[in-house]
C-alpha cells in the first residue's frame, strides 16, 4: 500500500497492467494526469540509489540519472533532486518534454518495489498545476499495510 494526497474531482482509474497501478485524470483535459506505478525488485535492493548502477558504468548521482531519463523522453531536464522522508530516499525530476508536455517524476524503492509517480500536464498549463503537482509528489509514501 501507499498514501497520497490525490486531486479531488479527478477521475480515478485502477491499474492497467504494464502501464500503471492507479491513475488520476482531469475531467476536462486527459493530458493532465497523475500515475502511480510499481515494479518488483530484488529483496536486496533497498534504495533508489541502486538505479545508479555499480562499477565503471555507474552514474554519478541524481543529476546524471535525470539526464539519462531526459534523453529517453526527448526532454530537457529542468531539475533533479533527492529527498529523504521517513527513511525512504526519493529521486525527483522535472522534465520539459519536446512534445509540449511538462512532467514531474518521483522514483523510490520501498517494500521490494521501485515506485514511480509521474504528474503530467501541457507546458502552457504548467504554471497553474505546478504547486498542486509538487504537493501530490511530496505527499506520496509507500507504507506497509
Image (cartoon, grey):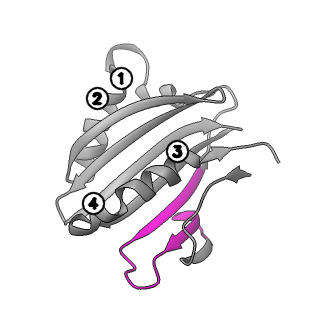
Task: Decide: few, some or many residues near mark 4? Use Cα within 10 Å; few <14, some 14-19, many ≥20.
Answer: few
Which residue bears the numbered disc 4? 127
Q: Residue at x 52, y 54 (%)?
A: 136
Q: Are marks 2 and 1 in contact (CB under 8 Å)?
A: yes
Task: Judge depth for marks 4 and 1 and give the one in front.
Answer: 4
Which residue bears the numbered disc 2? 64
Q: Residue at x 46, y 45 (%)?
A: 106
Task: Judge depth for marks 3 and 2 and give the one in front.
Answer: 3
Alpha carbon distance from label 3 to label 2: 22 Å
Residue 138 numbered mark, or none: 3
Which residue bears the numbered disc 1? 61
Q: Position of residue 1 (x, y in %)?
A: 74, 52
Task: Decide: few, some or many residues near mark 2? Use Cα within 10 Å; few <14, some 14-19, many ≥20.
Answer: some
Region rendered in magenta: 15-38
Q: Secondary structure at mark 2?
A: helix
Task: Judge depth for marks 3 and 4 and give the one in front.
Answer: 4
Q: Earlier in the sequence, mark 4 or mark 2?
A: 2
Front-most of residues 144 and 139 = 139
Q: Earlier in the sequence, mark 3 or mark 4?
A: 4
Alpha carbon distance from label 2 to label 1: 6 Å
Q: Are marks 3 and 4 in contact (CB under 8 Å)?
A: no
Q: Are marks 3 and 2 in contact (CB under 8 Å)?
A: no
Q: Quadrant of residue 69?
A: top left
Task: Decide: few, some or many residues near mark 3? Use Cα within 10 Å; few <14, some 14-19, many ≥20.
Answer: some
In the displayed structure, does residue 115 sit left or right of residue 130?
A: right
Q: Earlier in the sequence, mark 3 or mark 2?
A: 2
Q: Are marks 4 and 1 in contact (CB under 8 Å)?
A: no
Alpha carbon distance from label 3 to label 4: 18 Å
Q: Secondary structure at mark 4?
A: helix
In the displayed structure, does residue 27 sit left or right of residue 1?
A: left
Q: Earlier in the sequence, mark 4 or mark 1?
A: 1
Amino acid at each position: 500500500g501507499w498514501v497520497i494526497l490525490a486531486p479531488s474531482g479527478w477521475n480515478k482509474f485502477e491499474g492497467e497492467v504494464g502501464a500503471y497501478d492507479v491513475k488520476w485524470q482531469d475531467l476536462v483535459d486527459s493530458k493532465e494526469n497523475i500515475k502511480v506505478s510499481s515494479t518488483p525488485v530484488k529483496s536486496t535492493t533497498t534504495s533508489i540509489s541502486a538505479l545508479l548502477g555499480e562499477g565503471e558504468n555507474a552514474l554519478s548521482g541524481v543529476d546524471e540519472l535525470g539526464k539519462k531519463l531526459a534523453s529517453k523522453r526527448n526532454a530537457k531536464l529542468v531539475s533533479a533532486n533527492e529527498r529523504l522522508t521517513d527513511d525512504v530516499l526519493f529521486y525527483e525530476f522535472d522534465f520539459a518534454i519536446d512534445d509540449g508536455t511538462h512532467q514531474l517524476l518521483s522514483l523510490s524503492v520501498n517494500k521490494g518495489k521501485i515506485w514511480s509517480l509521474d504528474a503530467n500536464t501541457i507546458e502552457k498549463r504548467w504554471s497553474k498545476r505546478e504547486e498542486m503537482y509538487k504537493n501530490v509528489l511530496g505527499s506520496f509514501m509507500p507504507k506497509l499495510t
